[in-house]
Image (spheres, rainbow, N blue to C red):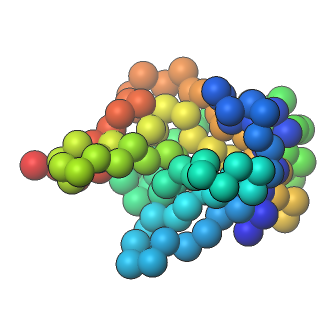
Amino acid sequence: MKVTFKKGLPGLEEYNDYEIKEIEGGEEFKLLQCNEKEELGLVIISPFQIEKEYEIKITDEVIKNLSITSPEDVLVYSTVTLNSDPKKITVNLRAPILINVHTGLAEQLITENEKYKIKHPIFKG
């Protein structure tokens, strides 16, 4: 799936053109691959895989920016920080990536909800 970030991602504003790719052997994980810089890619996962009751408020501005007309239009992903120690692999639940499934328009939303952490452990224990 092709994805376009009109404003880029925070810290990567100069890159707008991405593609979501499957990761072999990691069904719930995907790769958000930059088409403008081959070595730039982010591992992503649905936050609902981590927190079943995950909730975010999408502002009117984001709804307009992404041309969202219904909740079914939106895919939600969170970025994953990898580590050689699986217990230290984390997911950023504070700043989800929202994607309009029809247009491919995307934006990273920085939420104010302190319930969600920037470095939430994926594997407990």
User: Which residue sits at x=28%, y=47%?
Assistant: 83
Give the percent coordinates (x, y) of residue 108.
66, 37
User: Which residue sits at x=77%, y=50%?
Assistant: 36
User: Which residue sits at x=75%, y=31%?
Assistant: 13
Image quadrant assignment for residue 29: bottom left
Pick whichever, 48 or 37, lies toward us: 37
Residue furthest left as drawn: 125
Give the percent coordinates (x, y) of residue 22.
55, 73
State whether residue 23 appears in this view: yes
User: What is the number of callouts on the image?
Assistant: 0
Residue furthest bottom as drawn: 25
Pick whichever, 60 or 23, lies toward us: 23
User: Which residue sits at x=52%, y=64%?
Assistant: 30
Q: Is residue 25 above or below residue 125?
A: below
State whether residue 72 appears in this view: no
Q: Is residue 33 above or below residue 13?
A: below
Give the percent coordinates (x, y) of residue 75.
66, 58
Give the percent coordinates (x, y) of residue 94.
49, 32
Image quadrant assignment for residue 63: top right
Left-right relation of 14 to 44: right
Q: Quadrant of the N terminus?
A: bottom right
